[in-house]
Amino acid sequence: MMVTKGRINVKIDPKCWLNNAISNSGLRVIELTPEIAMESCNLPGGFHKDPADRIIVATARTHNLTLLTKDRKIIEYPHVKAIW
């Protein structure tokens, strides 16, 4: 978004940079599936309304992952494993 908005300039195409960063890091990209999308709409316990946070939490819950985040709303949400 910062490149798109002109806030930063980069020497390499952002899509190319992202693909290189992912392939060279050993990280795995998890696709947004219908199951994750539905889970994001049905999180237990009244999680807040931010759609990006809901998808992040739903992805972690669906794949039984621990989130590494500084976001207090996610850390304090009792229905997902999160640490910082």
Image (spheres, helix red, strand yellow):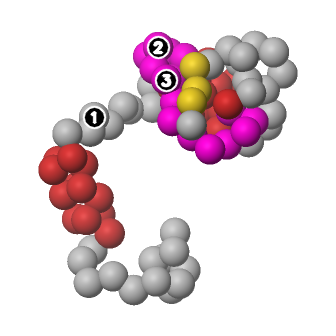
Which secondary structure lies at badge 2?
A: loop
Q: Are marks 2 and 1 in contact (CB under 8 Å)?
A: no
Q: Which-is-in-front pick, marks 3 and 1?
A: 3
Residues in magenta, as a range: 60-74
Identified at 62% across, 44% down, the residue is 70
Mark 3–mark 2 distance (CA, rounded to whole Å): 7 Å
72, above or below 6, in the image: above
Q: Earlier in the sequence, mark 2 or mark 1?
A: 1
Q: Mark 3: which amino acid?
A: Thr
* Residue where numbered disc 1 is placed: 28
Q: Earlier in the sequence, mark 3 or mark 1?
A: 1
Residue at the extreme right of the image, as rendered: 46
Task: Please give left or right for residue 19 compared with residue 5 in the image.
Answer: left
Q: Which-is-in-front pick, marks 3 and 2?
A: 3
Which secondary structure lies at badge 1?
A: loop
- The disc placed on residue 66 is 3
- The disc placed on residue 64 is 2
Residue 42 visible to an observer of this rendering: no
**Image quadrant containing the C terminus:** top right
How many numbered discs?
3
51, above or below 5, in the image: above
What percent of the width, then of the height, locates residue 35? Answer: 51, 17
Q: Are marks 3 and 1 in contact (CB under 8 Å)?
A: no
Q: Mark 2: which amino acid?
A: Asn
Q: Is residue 9 magenta?
A: no
What percent of the width, then of the height, locates residue 11? Answer: 26, 84
18, above or below 32, in the image: below
Identified at 53% across, 84% down, the residue is 7
Mark 2–mark 1 distance (CA, rounded to whole Å): 15 Å
Residue 29 visible to an observer of this rendering: yes
